[in-house]
Image: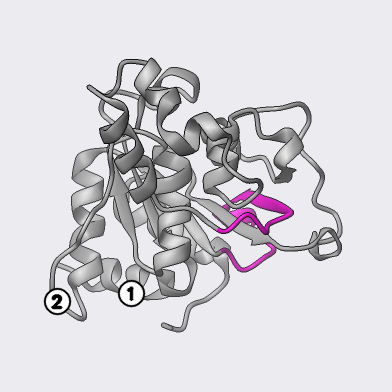
Amino acid sequence: MCESNGYDFIASKLKENMDLKKSPVAIKFVLREKDIPEGIPKVDGTLRHCELVQKASKGDVFYATVEEQKCKGGAAALGLMDAPEKIKTGEFYYELGRFSGLGSAKKTMESIPKVDPIMYALLYAPLDKATFDPDVIVLIVNPAQAMKLSQALVYTMGGRVEVDFAGIQSICADAVAGPFTRRQPNITLGCSGSRGYADIKEDEVIVGLTGENIGCVVNALENMS
C-alpha cells in the first residue's frame, strides 16, 4: 500500500492531474447493518447501481441495501443477493437478443466477476467526501483520461494493464465486483444498461481502482512527465 493523505486531497489530485469533470466515487462493501457509519443516510427510493454511482459523482453520500437496488442482476454481482435464475442461466440476456444461443449467454454469465451473496449494503460517496476507506474507487472518464490512468498504473512496477469486460453488467461487475474480488483495477466500455439508464455518454468509459492502491496511482500521476 502506498502512503497517501486524506481522500479529499487524493480526489483533488486526481481531478487536477486528469482534468476530471466528475468526482471519483468511493464505494465500500458493508457486511453487517451495524457497520454502517453513523451519519450516512440510506438513499431515497430505488435506483440501479450505475445510477447510484452517477448520483454519488455529483456530490451525494448514502448507502443502499438490496431493497434500494433496482437492478437485481447488478445487486447479485455486488454480493447483495443470489442471482435471479434467469440471470444465472443467461436466459435474460439471451431473450434480449444479446447472444446467439443460451450456451454463449450462460458461459458469459459464469465468467462475469461477482461477490459472494453475503453483503448487507454498499456505501457510496464522492471521494472528497468519503469518511470511510473505500474498497473500490470508480471514475467515469474519457478514453484519453483512461489512457493516462493506465500509464499511472504501470509507472512504478511496469507490465501491462489487463482489462476484462463483456458489454454487460459494466459498472456493477466490471468496475466494482471485479476490482473488489481480484484486487486489480479494471477498465470497462460500459453496457446498454449504464448508457441507457445512468447517462454514461458515448465518449465515456469506466475505470474501477482498488482503494488500497489509490495512493500509488496519485503518486504516479504527480511524477509522470
Residue count near mark 2 (Cα–Cα under 10 Å), binned few <14, some 14–19, many ≥20: few
Amino acid on which the number 2 mark rests in the picture:
Gly
Q: Quadrant of residue 190?
A: top left
For label 1, the residue is 219
- Residue shown at 25% from the left, 48% from the top: 146
Identity of the residue drawn at 23% across and 54% down: 163
Query: Label 1's element?
Result: helix
Closer to us: 218 or 86: 86
Closer to the observer: label 2 or label 1? 2
Left or right of 207? Residue 71 is right
Picture coordinates of residue 46, whole percent (x, y):
71, 27
What is the secondary structure assignment of the residue under circle 2? loop
Q: Quadrant of residue 170?
A: top left
Does 114 sit left or right of 33 as displayed? left
Q: Quadrant of the C terminus?
A: bottom left
Give the answer, above or below, for where 167 lies relative to 11: above
Q: CA distance from mark 2 to mark 1?
A: 15 Å
- The one of 10 and 139 positioned closer to us in this rendering: 139
**Amino acid type, residue under disc 1 in the picture:** Asn
Colour scheme of the picture: one colour
Q: N-terminal of the two: label 2 or label 1?
A: 2
Boundaries of the magenta span: 116-134
Who is closer to the viewer here, 63 or 105? 105
Q: Position of residue 93 (x, y in %)?
A: 39, 25
Left or right of 100? Residue 35 is right
Query: In which quarter of the view is residue 149 placed?
Result: bottom left
Q: Residues within 10 Å of mark 1 (few under 14, many from 20)?
A: some
Let me know if residue 117 is in the magenta part: yes
For label 2, the residue is 158
> In the image, is residue 97 above or below residue 161?
above
x and y percent of residue 56 in the render?
Answer: 60, 40
Residue at point 27%, 72% (across, down): 220
